[in-house]
Image (cartoon, coloured by chain):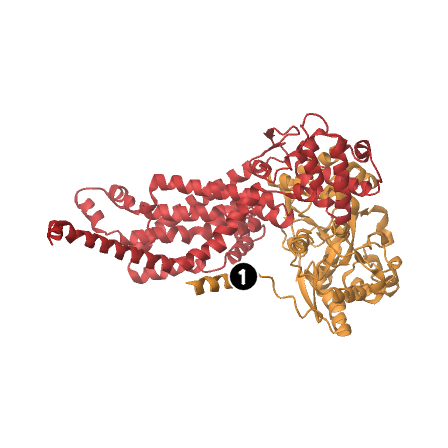
Amino acid sequence: MRMSVLALVGLTAGMLAPPNPAFAEDQLTVTGGGGSFQKVLRKVVFDPFSRASGIKVNEAEYDYGLAKIRAMVETKTVSWDVVYATESGVRQLCAEGTIETLDWKKLGLDPDKFEDANYTECGVPAGGAATIVIYDRDKLSNGPKTIADFFDLKKFPGKRGLYKSPPVEWALIADGVPIKDVYKVLRTPEGVDRAFSKLDTIKKDIIWWTAGAQAPQLLADGQVVMTDSWTTRVYDANKNSGKHFEIMWDAAVLTGNAWVIPKGSSRLDAAYKFLAFAGRPQPQADVANNTASGTGNRDAIALVDPTMLPNLPNAPQHMDRVVLSDSSFWSERGDELRQRFTAWLAK
Amino acid sequence: MATIAAHTGNLEDVPLRLKLRRVERRQKLKAFILVLPLLLFVLTTFVLPIGRMMFNAVHDNTLLKLMPRTMRALDAWDGSDLPGEAVYAALAGDLKESSAQRTASVIGKRINYELPGSLSEVISSARKVSKLSDGPYREALIETSPLWGQHGVWSLLKRGTSAYTGYYLLRSVDYQYSPDSRIVASPPENAIFRDVFLRTLGISIAVSVVTLLLGFPVAYLLATLPRKSSNLLMILVVLPFWTSVLVRTTAWVVLLQQHGVVNDTLMALHVISQPAELIYNRIGTIVAMSHIQLPVTLLPIYSVMKTISPIYVRAARSLGAGPFYAFWKVYFPQTLPGIAAGCLLTFILCLGYYITPALVGGPADQMVSSFVAHYTNEELNWGMASALGAILLTATLLLYYFFNKLVGVDRIKMG
């Protein structure tokens, strides 16, 4: 009897225990948003890094939600050593101490070389992507021109795809708020109400997506007439799948991204080596050349293929009508807005 | 000898009864020992985690743990007016520490559950207070953020002095604490959970009914056909049963989408001119769930029908009953235990559905488990997830109890 109890306890304990984190230094788990973008990262960042350092890179994927990182750090079961995160995510995680504060001397990089140096406390900027509206030129010859068109069901009947997170900036811009005032309006309760009542007008015609690969897929399947998407995915769909997806740049929402290290990673040294590598100009330029994402390191822009430059989200010709995502707004009010958004969706 | 003789009548049966009892006890013990490993397994992997989860629904010591000084100081506060300088000083001490430990966002998040908008205030006060050198703190704190001048935040903190809270359970049924600690209805933009529970029940009932209506005739056919052809049909029933739920759900996405097989066929046949909306709504959810649950309802009905002897119906017919009358009065009542078992299984399984509504339903078709997942994985609000789970579990057990009263579980036959 004793034996079976012991065996049982041993068995359950064995199943519940976290995997052994020993033999740390020769491998590293790097987590990104998956899909075509991560495929490029593998080719131009992970593999060259492995060849240069002898550290094997294991990959994991997530949907840019912060909860999993928080849960890992809180329960001290960190299995992601490096994470590719959005700027507002970096700020939030940094403020609550979920990710490592970086020692730039140890990294051997100059923080002043990076775009938007005020979030480099915890992350190495890796360039930005933009959330834009796309449509299929083959099916819709005269596509939407402004974000108001996205909300105009009469002019463009049919379903729209949207990323499952509160798209409040676009709702306000479509409702007539000038781009520069968007976050000022959103900081008032009336502004939030206004955004949600604008969203109400198209609620029935939205298909919500959660993984980056879904948006081009929904469009390709004809499930939606237009959808928001990330610039990097559109570039891939047109280049590698022969699609004719058109980008509507009006009110493109620009977000930065950065490489961060969750606190409690057992492979801190290797993670530092990875960040140092990923922050160099050449890998960053390689990523931009293959995905049309922006660059974080200013020295990288000289290495980017000149024909590629107009495709980058921070190209000068787009700048007069883009929304620079206010990461401090999102890190302060994001939780509240998402709560309201969840309730709004469920009705 | 005389005494023994006098008791002969008793002596005969007492040891026998004792012997019987001993044998019975030994058998019970043997049975118990055989069951014991499973019992321990169920205890450690099922009962304990569920108990822990139920406990989480009412237990929350975030404030108690992260604001120990304020909680101690608040013990003396009578709750009528704003608290005195001593409490504010304690708060300043806690905020200073939270700023150093980077726990301000955790405190802020907890307060934010009940007082939306407080998260940013708490984080910024913690940052500002860490620069304050000395008191008096009361004025200084109210100046850094008007939050600390509100009576509501203090009643909330006062409630935090107990490690037990009804907040999560109340929220799960659309109630909450008002600023003066009374229980009031949640504001309409947050009151969604009663709808969600009703929706979960509604979808589960609908799926049970659909599977019954579709499954009963097929089960009847299977039970009455000769073995050879019924075996073939049976394969058609159980083959999907053995396929992964995810695969079957994704197949429904392919079939039902706007330019999917169903819509394209109907359009080609000129039945409809516009693609019908078959997916990402309630129709898609019920169709896909019914397909997945069909064998679960059908198989118990079939196994019960298999045991019903055709003699009864034949006897009824020979006594002059019409075919329908014989079926309804003689055959159908005998299938009831199977129907009850099948529908109960389907109904209870449906209550916990998550992946199918997520893939083929719209946002307004998500069931309770989807919100449990949302609060567990996305919001990290494990109190809310536990409370929703606890209510769902209690509701299921209650339903089972009443079902048992009505039908009697002992009548259920699984074959």
Residue B33 x/y as whole percent: 37, 59
Q: In screen coordinates, is B77 left or right of A177?
A: left
Q: In screen coordinates, is A20 left or right of B30?
A: right
Q: State the red chain.
A: B
Residue type (three-letter) at the residue carrying disc 1: Ala
Residue B104 can be seen in this image: yes
Count the labels in the image. 1
* Chain holding disc 1: A
Residue B13 x/y as whole percent: 17, 52
Toward which corner of the image does residue B119 lie, by quadrant?
A: top right
Residue A116 can be seen in this image: no
Q: What color is chain A drawn in? A: orange
- Element on which disc 1 rests: helix
- Please name the residue that numbered disc 1 is placed on: A13
* The C terminus of chain B: image quadrant: bottom left
Q: Is residue B246 above or below residue A305?
A: above
Q: In screen coordinates, is A295 left or right of B41?
A: right
Residue depicted at 25% across the width and 53% down the height: B21
* The N terminus of chain B: image quadrant: bottom left
Judging depth in this view, the residue of A12 and B14 nearest the camera is: B14
Toward which corner of the image does residue B184 lie, by quadrant?
A: top right
Judging depth in this view, the residue of B289 and A185 nearest the camera is: A185
